[in-house]
Amino acid sequence: MKSCLIVDDSKVIRMVARKIMQELSFETIEAADGQQAIDECVKRMPEAVLLDWNMPVKNGIEFLRELRGMPGGDAPVVIFCTTENDIAHIHEAIEAGANEYIMKPFDSEIIQAKFVQVGLL
Amino acid sequence: MTPDEFNYISTLLKNTSGLVLSNDKAYLLESRLMPLARSNDLTSVEDLVRKMRATNDPKLATSVMEAMTTNESFFFRDQKPFDLFRTELLPQLMLDRAVQKSFRIWSAAASSGQEPYTLSIILKEEAAKLAGWRYEIIGTDISHDILAKARAGMYSQFEVQRGMPIQLLVKYFDKIDDQWQVKKEIRDHVIYKYFNLLESMLSLGKFDIIFCRNVLIYFDPPTKTKVLSEIARVLQPDGRLILGGAETVLGISDRFAPVQGKRGVYQLTS
Ligand SMILES: C[S@@+](CC[C@H](N)C(=O)[O-])C[C@H]1O[C@@H](n2cnc3c(N)ncnc32)[C@H](O)[C@@H]1O
């Protein structure tokens, strides 16, 4: 089973995302900020990361840059999932190594479409 | 709604657009026509039918047809056909047309434009190889409303997220408030026209590749056969036809045969 790390400071969003990812047959791991997410990745690299942008402690883009510098950190498919929906943010995310980008609000259809696009479904 | 009223609408739809409405779809008729009834100051779909019968108003008939057709579409729908187009059909076409250096593609049920714009974006991505080439993409549909949306090339955040890869989104769309508009350089390669697939296609000219996806499913077998034989007349002898995932020519038309190993792609039989 493929694993997906869900990184979001909102418990509700994590729950919604978890339900969707489990429906899509992913094993899910959760983190409430970028630092917790790094700790999870040190333990075990997930196949995919669903990543919020604005979070306390360490935000999504900081997490992503750090992840891409870690041993094995280029492997996970990282999909941003954020309310930031302007072109500048999207460019910044792509440059930092994001594979895809979901603008909130999202639904299961969009998540599924994006995971198909990146070849994980 | 009485069976007689249902028959009136379903006959009208069949004759004007080919759309077949089976008896179990009465609920669909109610839910889709109620808003139209209201906007005509009528309180029920029955009243709408009565008015149509009394006035024979062609505008009302068109509105009914537009309300009953399914316009759902998305960018890179099903992905595979567009991968095939980019990696196999286009390179082959460029070999076959190396002298003329031009080709024409038809999106035969273009709806709100996602299919022709997907093709236009793919071709723009291949611009280096296509230097010196001319190409046009014709997008046609029976619905004037949907064609207006296609021409504008303006999509909601929800619509662009169903299928458009993020790199291509930021490259080929402008963000205008909460909407995303296809850039002019992509729109300029697409020409939209009103066209009813039940009519003779010869006025459209010849095409090298025809995408006719997710529209034949709404027609009955004799209509499918007729549309496919018309398509055969406007496809170049070495051209290719691409159908939707739930559509086939098998048992419907002997003018086309599946291309081995390329799902959904058909060629003319000799
Ligand atoms: C479901 S959409 C398909 C859009 C696109 N080809 C795709 O696969 O995503 C079907 C379209 O066919 C159009 N249509 C239905 N009957 C038609 C006819 N007789 N002639 C031309 N277009 C028709 C409808 O207006 C609608 O926009």
Image: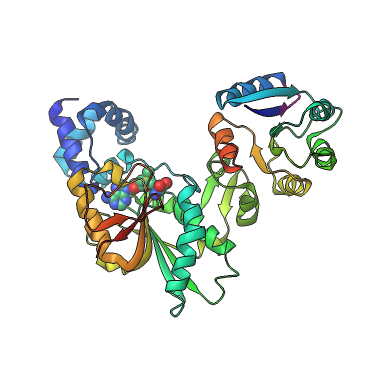
Residue A119's place in the image compared with B93, above or below, is above
Q: Locate residue B61: give its quadrant.
A: top left
> Image quarter for residue B256?
bottom left
Q: Is B118 located above or below residue B91 in the figure?
A: above
A73 left or right, relative to A107: right
Q: Is residue B187 above or below residue B81?
A: below
B220 versus B32 height, above or below: below
- Residue B260 or residue A70, whichever sits in front: B260
Q: Which residues are magenta?
A: A6-10
Q: Quadrant of the C terminus of chain B?
A: bottom left
Left or right of residue A30: residue B233: left
Q: Where is residue B81 drawn, in percent x and y?
A: 45, 51
Residue B126 horizontal/vertical position (percent): 57, 64
Residue visible at 42% across and 53% down?
B148
Give the farthest residue toward the front. B260
Q: Measuring 81% from the left and 38% from the top, which residue is drawn there?
A: A67
Indicate the position of residue B14 as horizontal and vertical percent values: 20, 43
Can the viewer see residue B152 in this picture?
Answer: no
Image position of B111 (left or right of A79): left
Give me the residue at 71% from left, 33% from top. Answer: A49
Q: Residue at x 64, y 38 (%)?
A: A102
Q: Residue furthest right?
A: A57
Point out the image quarter for the N terminus of chain B: top left
Can residue B118 be seen?
Answer: yes
How many circles with numbers are drawn on the protein?
A: 0
Magenta stretch prevailing secondary structure:
loop
